[in-house]
Image: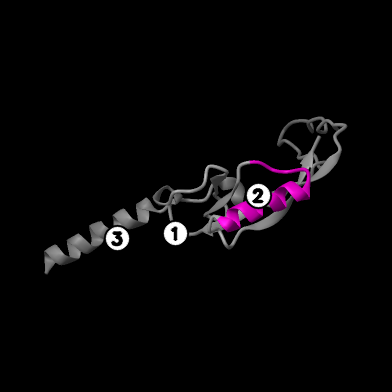
Amino acid sequence: MKIIFTTMFVLCTMLLSAQTEKPPYCEEGPSTYGSVAAIPGGSTPPPLPRFTTTPTKEYKIQVAILRYTDPAEYPFHSDLVARYRPCEQVWVVESRESFPNRADAVKLQQKLKDLGYSGAYITELMGYQ
């Protein structure tokens, strides 16, 4: 009986230590670009520089969101990449490239659907030039 409890304790300890923790920045609230944080005992740092960039809408094709699954276990098309989002603790399988033209994104989406990725859909993102 003592061996069973010891084994269960060791097993539970190993399982808890094997869980990945979220990075500290996931718990922090979003800071605005223009805000300046005060340093204790010092002066406030200068504001961040303003860049002369223009926002442009770009498109990506998203195929899957994997939770509790390692994407290394599955082969993907060469146009796709799996990217880990530590705050959400999920893997996102999406196109390697982003497209400035929606028509190009639709072409890739149709190509992936023809290959069997029936859940392929277009996502919009903001890019800066």
Left or right side of 76 for 58? right
Rendered location of residue 108, percent (x, y): 65, 49
The kind of residue on which mark 1 rests is: Tyr
Can the viewer see residue 63?
no
Asked which colour scheme the image uses, the reply is: one colour
Q: Residue at x 55, y 51 (%)?
A: 93
Left or right side of 72 for 55? right
State the SS at label 1: loop
Outermost residue on the front side: it is: 114
Rendered location of residue 29, percent (x, y): 69, 52
The kind of residue on which mark 2 rests is: Leu
Magenta segment, principal secondary structure? helix
State the SS at label 3: helix
18 or 3, which is in the foreground? 18
Query: Which residue corresponds to mark 2?
Result: 108
- How many labels sit on residues? 3
| Cα distance in 3D space between marks 2 and 1 | 27 Å
Q: Residue at x 15, y 66 (%)?
A: 4
Q: Is residue 112 magenta?
A: yes
Q: Which label's residue is closer to the chain start, 2 or 3?
A: 3
60 or 19, which is in the foreground? 60
Q: Which label's residue is closer to the chain start, 2 or 1?
A: 1
Can the viewer see residue 112?
yes
Query: Which residue corresponds to mark 1?
Result: 68
Query: Which residue corresponds to mark 3?
Result: 12
Q: Is residue 104 magenta?
A: yes
Q: What segment carries the magenta color?
A: 97-114
Q: Are marks 3 and 1 in contact (CB under 8 Å)?
A: no
The kind of residue on which mark 3 rests is: Cys
Pointer 2: residues within 10 angstroms few (<14), some, or many (20+)?
A: many
State the SS at label 2: helix
